[in-house]
Image: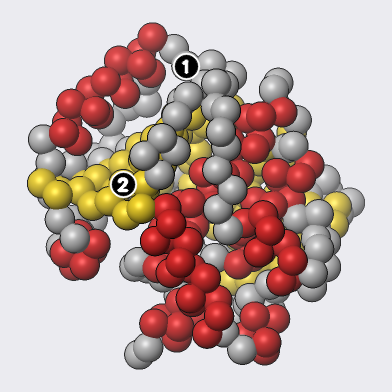
Amino acid sequence: MDYRNRLLAGMIIAALGIWLSPMTRIDSTAFGQISTERSTEFRIDTDIYTDETKPPVHTTQTMFLATRTIEWDDTHRRLIVVDYKDQSVMLADLPAQRKCRIGMPELEDRISNLRSQMTSEEFATWTSPTQARLDEKGFYELACERSAYRFKTKSPSIEKMAIDYSEFADWSVKMHAVNPPYKPPLLRMQLNAFLRDQRALPIELRLLDKRSSSSKEIIARLIVQDQLSAMDLDRIRDWDVLTATLKNVSEVEYFRQASAGPINRPSRK
């Protein structure tokens, strides 16, 4: 299966704008704006559910710092670090004792190359032709032929928090579009653009695979904390020490040997 088909065949499983034309919005906003001033520090915790009556199946903590953003995967003990100072995205797998790094310009080039291989029909399949619209239940809706998002938002205490969140979400989407599980990125990048333009943060996201009549929504609930605690800063220092000890490997090796299955999740601090 060629690279483009792997991208189109994957289904977005993570929960993780004002709409211009598809070409204009994704070119101008979603592909790689990098903030030059990043002084706001805050945290977002995310719980992901496949069944609302049961505990979350996946949890993350995302720390937004002055020059980088760190997302800690509680379930698998993995990190994604977007470093705006050295222009890189790093993935780290603590149980497997390895990490890999990709430069932002290279990641941009690979995303652009994937997009350039798509036909207009394929592009239309994976993007919404309309703006996000508010329904009677207070959810915004953004849908393409294959999947649909419903989401609720709130205004952050500082507008820049919404910009920082959408920017990090774009880099995460791009990394997981060019590496396993090859999640189609375009609809989520439209959602990120909407959040950026509206200066809003999501508090709940619901993702539906429209290709199956029996599919259930994947639900992400986000809790925003306006500042980092002393405990958060201690944990970041611990992560820095741990990741410095990990072996540097290529992307191919990193994903070929990705550690299997979740481990027992530590209690959230």
Residue 39 image position (x, y, % from top left): 55, 21
Compared to residue 9, the image places residue 188 above or below, namely: above
Of 203 and 81, nearer the camera is: 81
Residue depicted at x 46% and y 25%:
65
Give neighbour class at mark 2: few <14, some 14-19, many 20+ (Cα, 10 Å). some
Apparent side of residue 44 relative to residue 96 in the rendered image (left or right): right
| Amino acid type, residue under disc 2 in the picture | Met
Type of amino acid under label 1 = Leu
Q: 29 above or below 147?
A: above
Which type of secondary structure does the marked residue at label 2 adopt?
Answer: strand
Q: In screen coordinates, is 224 left or right of 136?
A: left
Q: Quadrant of residue 124?
A: bottom right
Can I make out residue 60 in this image? no
Picture residue at 44% right of the left edge, 12% below the top: 229
Q: In this view, does 60 lie to the left or right of 156?
A: left
Q: Residue 236 carries which label?
A: none
Label 2 vs label 1, nearer the camera: 2
Mark closest to the chain's N terminus, 2 or 1: 2
Against 183, residue 52 (above or below) is above
**Image quadrant where one finds the C terminus:** top left
Question: Where does label 1 land, which residue?
Answer: 228
Q: Which residue is drawn at 31% across and 23% down?
A: 236
Secondary structure of the residue carrying numbered label 1: loop
Disc 2 marks which residue? 90
Coordinates of residue 222 in the picture (x, y in percent)? 57, 36
Give the x, y percent position of residue 34: 55, 43
Quick check: 235 left or right of 220? Answer: left
Task: Name the quadrant of the N terminus.
Answer: bottom left
